[in-house]
Image (tube, grey):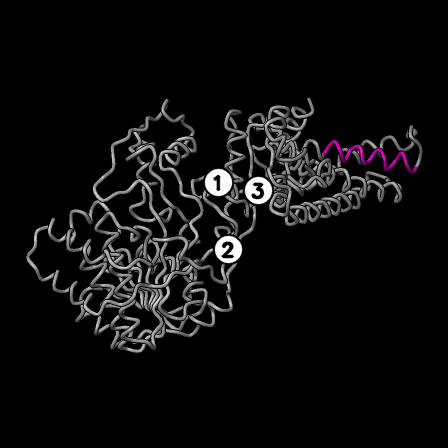
Amino acid sequence: MKEKILYCWLKCAARGKRVALLDFCLMGVAVYLGFALRLTLLVGPRFMNALALTALVWPACVVAAMWGMRVYRVYWPQASVEEYTRMTTAYILGCALFICVNFFSAAIVVPRTSFAITLFGGLVFTGTARVSWRLAEFYVSSAGTGPRARNTIIIGAGEAGAYLARDLRRRGSAFRLVGFIDSDPMKKGKIIAGVPVLGGDEEIARFFREYEARVALIAIPSAGGERIRRYLDALSALNVEVRVLPSPRELAGGAIEFGSLRSVELQDLLRREPIRLDEAGIYSVVSGKKILVTGAGGSIGSEICAQLAGHRPAELLALGHGEHSIYNLLQRLDDIGSAVPCRPIIADIADETTMERVFAEHRPEIVFHAGAHKHVPLMEENPREALRVNALGTWTVADLAGARGAERVIMISTDKAVRPSSVMGATKRIAERLLRRAQSDHPDTRYIAVRFGNVLGSRGSVVPLFEKQIMAGGPVTVTHPDMRRYFMLIPEAVNLVLQAAAMGRGGELYVLDMGKPVNIAGMAETLIKLHGREPHADVKIEYIGLRKGEKLFEELFYDPLQVEGTGHEKIFLSKLDEENSHLADDVKNLLKLNASADDLRKNIFSLAREPRD
């Protein structure tokens, strides 16, 4: 009933003629009060004629002034200071008009005290009506009292949750906030931002059933993937829409508001605790330096460039083989407002003549080598190209960097280089070993390799393929029900790459903590659920068998017992292999041979099977 009254009252505010009639009536009441408070509640016959004329002429003058100043075109439920100023000005002009009419006609005799009360009362009444519309709009929006509003619970009553609740109440939405859920027992029963804290996480399902909530807003930007997964599991059987605030990195200092909310994505389930970085150490290494990034247009390379831009290098040299990807990188740097000069370079890292010219002309002080072929099945069909780019390209970059006096070379490696079963993994293993040879040849340059697994959102990742298949109605194709892979978010991986670059003293192979391996079939099921469908029922999962070069499980180390910790809990240390003085020549000679693809594969694996790390 209260909601219906509020909506009817708000509808009145949308009709200018109705507002004008209401003003006329309210000012008539103000005239009566002016006379009654000055004389008596039952105004005597002596002033009855003056009362009637004043109650007709004065409101008419004020309404005419307001109409002329377009006050009745204002939508008062969303009015601001400017609109109230306009109304007050029109009110004053209307009163002045009445005084002029009465002065020249002398038709109305009004006691001065009564007229003063009338003027004040009229302003209060008409102003109060307009304020009531604003308050009614605020109540309707904040309480979510619309006919389609859905009961909503915010998970997380911290600063982010409080900001979100206030924003929802301020701007209005289709969410009717019924409470918070928070794990802090001290907050239970308290009211935050006008919303009660119902209880803790352990009772989440009960609260949603009890309050018939249909929307969950997870307002914990720092929540890890396991915690978000627990919320999803608890709500999965309740037909609840779940939205989440992005991680602190995605928010990037932006305001926490309704527009920040989005649907839960796979990356949210892979979130980990925020990484502790030695920002000062990273800054001291890269600030003011000329930095070359190979593979700069790729997923990792572009993120390296974006993060380096925040540490104020003197210049970024963005080198890539594809012009479109480098163009996209330049656009991205422009979008984030980077003030660091960025020079685009289109080149092939295995082209020694071109790379010699790049190093001679620009003389980079630090090199991040992310350029490589990474697609396992494609490299199985193109082993020569994998060897040329991944192995020879790495040697070309590393050798030229040392010859031209670069301070550091940081190479991005992969978990597929451990006991490689694919050409791609084998060539990256050779690249790791070539880096050790470069360290021996150029001891004044610090060579560092950083090894990690798959990154979520990279080009060629399985996730976009799964999403495309889900949107098409399935089936989702998975190679094997037991296949597992390590996954990491791209920004997190690059965070640790920069940290390793600052830590390295030369000759290290750093391995990043990838967390627990993820079952690919389970990932596919999760993605299907996040799209609002039921695995195996709405969308089928089809197992197609391992492709050539693939393994069921990837490893990060040859021998975990030989791995050492570092000053950072997410980074482990393993020494690069002892150098092989002939490895670079072996790679070049192999590329010169007119060998078949099968023979090339055998030789590539032979070069890769050397001392373990």
- Magenta part of the protein: which range? 24-38
Q: Is residue 68 visible?
A: no
Residue 219: assigned label:
3
- Give the foreground label among 2 and 3: 2
Identify the mark nearer the N-term, 2 or 3: 3
Query: Horizontal placement of 291 versus 158: left or right?
Result: left
Identify the mark nearer the N-term, 2 or 1: 1
Residue 199: assigned label:
none
Residue 364, quarter of the rendered image: bottom left
Quote the CA–CA distance across marks 2 and 3: 20 Å
Counting every numbered tag in the picture gives 3
Q: Is residue 157 visible?
A: yes
Q: Which residue is disc 1 drawn over?
A: 262
Note whether 55 is above or below 549 in the view shown.
Answer: above
Q: Horizontal and vertical percent for residue 69? A: 62, 45
Prevailing secondary structure class for the magenta stretch in the rendered image: helix
Note whether 299 is above or below 267 in the view shown.
Answer: below
Q: Which residue is disc 2 drawn over?
A: 275
Identify the mark nearer the N-term, 1 or 3: 3
**Mark 1 surroundings within 10 Å by alpha-carbon count, few (fewer than 14), some (14 through 19), many (20 or more):** some
Residue type, mark 3 in image? Ala
